[in-house]
Image (cartoon, rainbow, N blue to C red):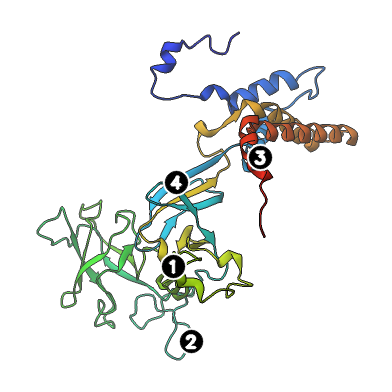
């Protein structure tokens, strides 16, 4: 009957993984135990399919992950020159974004609502919209084209690789319309190249031969087997992902703030000048905004090269290993599943549904209190300083 009867202390401590897992119960066990305790003759739920229980269990796990479970994840990267960070694969919403200094202290980066990364429409000189995607003076599509993006048709991988060292770079020949006499004239060295799964992320144009209409990539494609046909590659300026002029100006702008002592002679002449300042802008930690459409976080220029930590929440359904419930919230899971099932069934009296709703609310609240992990000694230490007089 013991939960640890199948594992010895030696096997636990000599293992490389699974430390601390006893505090969790897998979602599979929660579903099995719910069916045993709640489903059957003379029980609350007389009959239900296992697939229905699984659906409501996964939904309950999602909802509890957002505001009850300690499901915060984190990622740390060094911000590249393009001043952007990709959103994690299982990202739902951010909790906090910080950068760490030389002592490992985290400084909060605050969001800005005064800028964004809109779709920058390609226009002609007279202001009309330009639908020419490859600059051959022929309209190519009916949808709008991004200003900083160019599409070109190239020979497929392997057909024209002429680099003498095929392990470091690859050269491609451009296929173009007879009406386009200079197909490579609008390309630039340093442009980012995407549009194919065989081109590594971050590949750029290292050289351009306008005479033979050939370009050389900075990285060798993963597929160099000769193939027949053409492929359309995407070229973008300044970043792997196309950015608007607004976003580029935000990143290129140098902040006028400096780290200084507000009480020394440098700021003495500005005494009283900060009256009425907006507190959200009265900080030197930098700022960011999230481009939900592109799935990226854009940072201000003073974050370049710094180590940034993204703390975010997920829905605990990304992988099978994540589908687990803390034992403090196990009862809340059962109540959430039961309420969801009863509220979705037909011919159930309203007072029964309300009873399950109250049980769910009470169990969830109790789980939040348990998972808040409040300790008397820690609270006492914090409250010891609350008796000090604070001058305003």
- Indicate whether 153 appears above or below 86: below
For the point 48% across and 12% down, the residue is 7
Quadrant placement of the N terminus:
top right
Q: Nearer the viewer, mark 4 or mark 3?
A: 3
- Indicate whether 306 appears above or below 370: below
Distance from disc 2 to disc 4, alpha carbons, whole Å, reads 43 Å
| Percent of width and height locating residue 212 | 16, 74
Residue placed furthest toward the left: 164
Instruction: Give the class, few, some or many, for how many residues have Cα within 10 Å of label 1's Cα (few <14, many ≥20).
Output: few
Q: Is residue 162 visible?
A: yes
- Indicate whether 105 appears above or below 350: below
Q: What residue is pinned by disc 3?
A: 383
Q: Nearer the viewer, mark 3 or mark 1?
A: 3
Instruction: Give the class, few, some or many, for how many residues have Cα within 10 Å of label 3's Cα (few <14, many ≥20).
Output: few
Q: What residue is pinned by disc 2?
A: 128
What secondary structure is found at the residue carrying circle 2?
loop
- Indicate whether 175 appears above or below 331: below
Residue 83 falls left or right of residue 353: left
Instruction: Give the class, few, some or many, for how many residues have Cα within 10 Å of label 2's Cα (few <14, many ≥20).
Output: few
Q: Is residue 232 visible?
A: no
Q: What residue is pinned by disc 1?
A: 258
Q: Which mark is residue 75?
A: 4
Q: Nearer the viewer, mark 2 or mark 4?
A: 4
For the point 37% across and 61% down, the residue is 304
Distance from disc 3 to disc 1, alpha carbons, whole Å, reads 34 Å
Quick one: label 3 or label 1, which is nearer the N terminus?
1
For the point 65% across and 27% down, the residue is 328
What secondary structure is found at the residue carrying circle 4?
strand
């Amino acid at each position: 009957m013991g939960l640890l009867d199948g594992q010895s202390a030696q096997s636990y401590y000599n293992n490389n993984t699974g430390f601390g897992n006893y505090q969790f119960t897998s979602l599979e066990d929660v579903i099995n135990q719910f069916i045993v305790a709640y489903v059957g003759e003379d029980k609350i739920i007389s009959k239900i399919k296992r697939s229905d229980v699984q659906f409501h269990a996964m939904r309950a796990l999602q909802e509890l992950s957002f505001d009850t479970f300690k499901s915060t994840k984190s990622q740390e990267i060094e911000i590249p020159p393009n001043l952007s960070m990709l959103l994690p694969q299982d990202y739902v919403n951010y909790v906090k974004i910080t950068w760490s200094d030389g002592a490992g202290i985290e400084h909060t980066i605050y969001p800005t609502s005064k800028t964004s990364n809109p779709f920058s429409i390609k226009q002609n000189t007279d202001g009309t919209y330009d639908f020419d995607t490859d600059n051959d003076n022929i309209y190519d599509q009916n949808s709008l084209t991004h200003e900083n993006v160019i599409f070109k048709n190239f020979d497929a991988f392997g057909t024209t690789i002429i680099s003498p060292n095929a392990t470091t770079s690859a050269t491609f020949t451009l296929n173009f319309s007879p009406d386009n006499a200079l197909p490579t004239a609008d390309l630039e060295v340093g442009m980012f190249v995407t549009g194919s799964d065989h081109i590594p992320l971050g590949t750029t144009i290292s050289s351009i031969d306008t005479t033979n209409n050939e370009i050389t990539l900075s990285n060798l494609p993963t597929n160099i087997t000769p193939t027949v046909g053409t492929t359309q590659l995407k070229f973008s300026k300044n970043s792997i992902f196309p950015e608007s002029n607004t976003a580029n100006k935000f990143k290129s702008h140098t902040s006028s703030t400096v780290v200084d002592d507000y009480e020394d002679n440098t700021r003495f002449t500005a005494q009283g000048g900060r009256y009425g300042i907006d507190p959200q802008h009265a900080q030197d930690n930098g700022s960011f905004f999230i481009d939900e459409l592109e799935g990226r976080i854009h940072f201000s220029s003073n974050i370049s090269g710094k180590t940034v930590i993204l703390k975010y929440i997920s829905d605990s359904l990304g992988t099978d290993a994540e589908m687990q419930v803390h034992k403090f919230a196990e009862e809340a899971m059962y109540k959430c599943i039961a309420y969801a099932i009863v509220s979705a069934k037909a011919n159930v009296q309203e007072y029964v549904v309300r009873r399950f709703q109250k049980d769910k609310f009470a169990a969830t609240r109790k789980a939040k209190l348990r998972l808040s992990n409040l300790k008397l000694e820690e609270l006492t230490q914090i409250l010891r300083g609350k008796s000090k007089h604070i001058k305003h």
